[in-house]
Image (tube, rainbow, N blue to C red):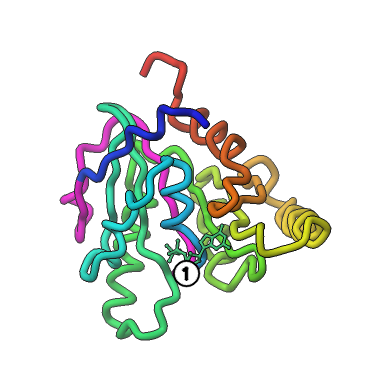
Amino acid sequence: MNPYYRRARFLSSAARLHQAPPDHGFEVAFAGRSNAGKSSALNALCDQRALAKTSKTPGRTRLLNFFVLDHQRRLVDLPGYGFAKVPEGTRREGQSLMEGYLSQRHSLQGLMLVMDCRHPLVEFDRQMLEWNAHHQLPTRILLTKSDKLKRGAASATLLRVRRELSRYGDMVSVQLFSSLKKLGIDDAHAQLDGWLRLGEEA
Ligand code: GDP
């Protein structure tokens, strides 16, 4: 466990792009269908119980939530997609906020796309991957809740998803993850370290 990520602290929420913190340094965003396990993954990666709880408080679920690691580095929790009960207008607003963020944010280095390993590559996941490829945004897929599958089934899912996404080449990578069993943490940290230029002078 890399202790560096333990220092993550909630910084601010943004309902509009101009409310985001200054766009310098390095940022990695987390996206995924609601209930996929995004908050749990953020908490597990930062070794904190309730870090991403902030993003779940009513009124904050449609916002961009920023967590600071140091003066140059941040993690960003994007609105979970697929809320059945959200009215169309609100859903569109959330989507345009996310699209604006993803297309305009200079400090954004990569995206962690969280999927429940039992239901990977839902329609919106696929749209997101197409969009990322178009914008050349490197993406790591976390196939989380891997503790819910037997080892053989988890490996088979990993291979299937990898094979399906091979057309994206190096832009998209895939790994198994479990927040509950703390599996895949080192692998995900290594990806974060690279995107956040940890170990390099920022
Ligand atoms: P979010 O809506 O994407 O932020 O999802 P949450 O992190 O709130 O997780 C949704 C549900 O899945 C919760 O009941 C979590 O306890 C559960 N969950 C999340 N990650 C894991 C995991 O790695 N293993 C298992 N077994 N359950 C998980």
Badge 1 marks a residue whose secondary structure is loop
Residue 14 drawn in magenta: yes
**Amino acid under label 1?**
Asn
**Which range is magenta?**
12-35
Quick check: 52 above or below 190? below
Badge 1 density bin: few <14, some 14–19, many ≥20, Cα 10 Å: some
Looking at the rendering, which quadrant does residue 61 occupy?
Answer: bottom left
Residue at x-position 48% and y-position 62%? 32
Identify the residue at image location x=57%, y=40%: 185
From the viewer's side, name the closer residue of 16 and 180: 180
Horizontal side, residue 96 vs residue 167: left or right: left
Could you say where residue 110 lies in the image, as x and y percent from the top left? 48, 42
Q: Residue at x 57, y 58 (%)?
A: 129
Quadrant of the image containing the C terminus = top left
Q: Tell me where residue 94 sits by quadrant.
A: bottom left
Q: Residue at x 28, y 47 (%)?
A: 66
In this rendering, would 170 be left or right of 196?
right
Q: Which residue is mark 1?
A: 35
- Of residue 202 and residue 193, the one placed in the foreground of this image is 193
Horizontal side, residue 86 vs residue 145: left or right = left
Find out if the beta carbon at label 1 lies less than 8 Å from the nearest ligand 1 atom: yes
Tally of numbered tags: 1
Q: Position of residue 180 (x, y in %)?
A: 55, 54
Identify whether 183 is placed above or below 123: above
Residue 85 is situated, as x and y percent measured from the top left of the image, at: 36, 85
Residue 26's x, y, as percent? Answer: 36, 32
Relative to 21, say whether 33 is above or below: below
Outermost residue toward the left in this view: 19
Q: Is residue 23 magenta?
A: yes
